[in-house]
Amino acid sequence: MLLSGALGTTRLTGSLKPGSLVVMFDSEDVLTYDRAGRLWSRRVNGRTFRRGLDGRLMEKWPEHGRRQRRWLTSLQAAGLLDESAARMRDLVEQTTAGRVAWTIAPEDGEWLRVLERAARFDARAAEHDRDRFADVYSPIGMLPPDQYLALVLQATAGCSFNTCTFCNFYAGERFRIKSPQVFREHVRAVRAYLGDSLALRRSIFLSEANALTIPYDRLMPLLEIARAEFDGWPLYAFLDAFSGRKKSIDEYRQLAAAGLKRVSLGLESGHPPLLKFVRKPGAARDALETVSTLKAAGIAVSLIVLIGLGGDRYADLHVSDTIDALNAMPLTKGDIIYFSDLVEHADTAYPALARAAGIRALTIGELNAQRQAIRAGLRYGPGGPIISKYDIGEFVY
């Protein structure tokens, strides 16, 4: 449903979609809410604010040709939420009083009902919503970009290896597989928490870091629970290349029949000594075997390559061996190759290891050149995979 109208000299546009409500004031202030009335994003004065279900708010803006971002403080976030809710309350009041000249009448009152929910989502309501989220979910580490709108269902906690020196997502967290009973309770709690905002989600992402490492006989009952609650939703998940070799092609075919559409693997690099240096389990040959088996079972893949990993010391062989590894894989339409720039976190082992080895981090120009060199070396025809950049800092769930 698309509406246009006016409040005095202010031009208004409203859009009620299956998953969201969008309200635009004079093309300068655009607020987006999910159908449960949670603020999703706001764009005002060239700046975009994106709220995650965990309560954090990210601000993004262009500056000197580059996109900048920061997390708002609690006080800043509260101010934005209160001001947004006040703007929605005023719109509700003006609409119900007949002072908004809508050119298309709201149908069945649904427009106004969602607008009223948005008007109640102030800082206090958002804080309560954040606490409810924490009761339902453990911290969500990351998702591949094609799954940012997925419904996350946490079949595991932590990472099954948790040895990669560049990763800080699961530090100190023991890997655990949920029992069917615990997983069923989690799934139902997620459904109850999200409510009408489920309409915004497009698929299921089985998490956390390496959920498909769950042994087949324990994994299938969990997928059956997910399918029972969300029948027909496609399934996606992470998998490491080493563990991926442990399932047979017939088991993967059964997973495909259960709805598994695409599996994301962190290849990171095709250069074995570099993977050993960063303590990444497995090698490029493991990734090739896992990808080949998945593809033969009818499951698509996405692969993540870390641009800048190993700095200047490993740069040349990181490029050449990664090109060789990717070209050896039977990648086709429906598959994705992601290039993600390495982000060095002070609370991980990688920076100290790099310093001790005399490794210099690549400059922005060198990162761009490395990304372009790998891409230029790939040999796929018109029906090949999508190739895209993956900025981990953009992730907000």
Image (cartoon, grey):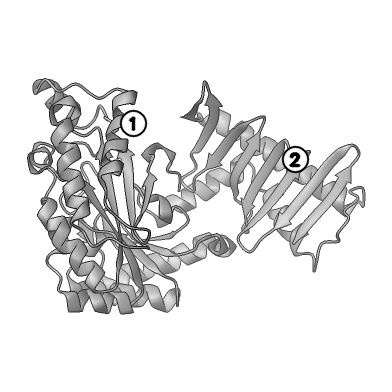
Quadrant housing residue 204:
bottom left
Quadrant housing residue 250:
bottom left
Can residue 217 be seen here?
A: no
Label number found at residue 368: 1
**CB contact under 8 Å: marks 2 and 1:** no
**Alpha-carbon span between mark 2 and mark 1:** 42 Å
How packed mark 1 is, by other alpha carbons closer than 10 Å (few <14, some 14-19, many 20 or more), is some
How packed mark 2 is, by other alpha carbons closer than 10 Å (few <14, some 14-19, many 20 or more), is some
Q: Amino acid at mark 2?
A: Arg
Label number found at residue 87: 2
Relative placement, left or right, of 302 versus 36 is: left
Label number found at residue 93: none
| Front residue of this view, candidates 303 and 120 | 303
Residue 392 is situated, as x and y percent measured from the top left of the image, at: 37, 40
| Front residue of this view, candidates 285 and 36 | 285
Relative placement, left or right, of 290 versus 147 is: left
Point 38% across, 72% down: residue: 226
Residue 287 is situated, as x and y percent measured from the top left of the image, at: 16, 56
Point 29% across, 73% down: residue: 298
| Front residue of this view, candidates 225 and 265 | 265
**Who comes first in sequence, dot 2 or dot 1?**
2
Residue 382 is situated, as x and y percent measured from the top left of the image, at: 37, 58
Relative placement, left or right, of 249 versus 35 is: left
Query: Which element is circle 1 on?
Result: helix
Q: Is residue 251 above or below residue 273?
A: below
- How many numbered discs? 2
Point 24% across, 39% down: residue: 167
Quadrant housing residue 117:
bottom right
Q: Amino acid at mark 1?
A: Asn
Query: Which element is circle 2 on?
Result: helix
Residue 159 is situated, as x and y percent measured from the top left of the image, at: 21, 51
Can residue 184 be seen here?
A: yes
